Image (cartoon, rainbow, N blue to C red):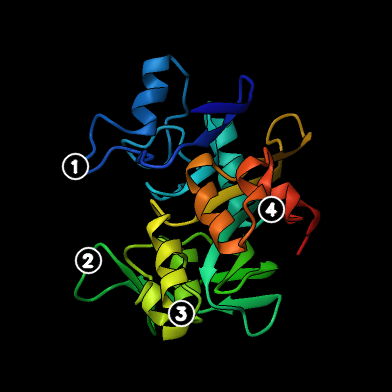
Amino acid sequence: MNFVYEDEHLAVLDKPAGLVVHPGPGHWNDTLVNVLVGRGTELSSGSTEGRPGIVHRLDRDTSGLLVVAKSDLAHRRLAGAIERRAVKRVYAALVWGHLRKSPVDIEAPIARHPKERKRMTVAEGGRHATTHAARVARFAHADLLRVRLGTGRTHQIRVHLAHIGCPIVGDREYTFGGSRRVTPSARREAERLETLAPRQLLHAAALSFTHPVTGVTLALTSEWPDDLRPALAEAAGDANLLAQRNPLQYLGFFASDD
């Protein structure tokens, strides 16, 4: 786990996939919070017991940038900034199919699934949720998207993209068919892409906000992770991506500002 930025008030981490953010059922001692406490990192008391320092979260199998608060002052101000949508969180996502239009604003309420309690779903009466998505690159069977959060609901990006018919490649919970969605004549190519996806191809690639204490603007980025590079190269039909140190930059991801 890399520290992209750190001072006495906060830290921005590049979280690896497979790491749960805070303790909970089934993960009491093997979380990001446990790692930070073990490192001796001072953390804010947090707004919820057992979640010191945690201002926002990433799913276990989503990698990328995450800010944690070291002081209660920083925590309070960061939480307020997120609530006011003053923290810009941008994700790279490889999705099945193609956006009908780009950019697109997805506004659909999200609630816990009535039968499968670990899953979320779009449902009337759910919590308001807004996601902004724009195409960075169009490939044969998939789009690389730049996704910005308007709100921060559980599994929001995964649920919203599936809702508009473009689920994330490699997502085991919300893909709804995966490669089987692709026309039979191209099924083999799609299945090859699917086998190269070790997890959902979703990465928190950019994070920008005003420092809650110093007032300095922080704009941080994280490149596409190595474990997802073969799948991206397969989707793009471009073996050069395997050799690229900065595949997102190569594809123009960071040049966009939707």
Q: Could you give the CA–CA distance between mark 1 and mark 3, rounded to whole angstroms?
A: 29 Å
Q: Horizontal and vertical percent for residue 141?
A: 55, 74
User: Label 4 is placed on what type of residue?
Assistant: Ala
Quarter of the figure with residue 127: bottom left
Residue 136 versus residue 236: which sits nearer the camera?
Answer: 236
At 37% from the left and 38% from the top, the residue drawn is: 19
Q: What element carries label 3?
A: helix
Q: Mark 3 points at which residue?
A: 163
At 38% from the left and 24% from the top, the residue drawn is: 35
At 64% from the left and 49% from the top, the residue drawn is: 241
Side of 45 relative to 50 (left or right) = right
Among numbered discs 2 and 4, the one appearing first in the sequence? 4
User: Label 1 is placed on what type of residue?
Assistant: Gly
Q: Could you give the CA–CA distance between mark 2 and mark 4, rounded to whole angstroms?
A: 31 Å
Q: Nearest to the eye among marks 1 and 3: give it.
A: 3
Side of 210 relative to 157 (left or right) = right
**Outermost residue to the top:** 40
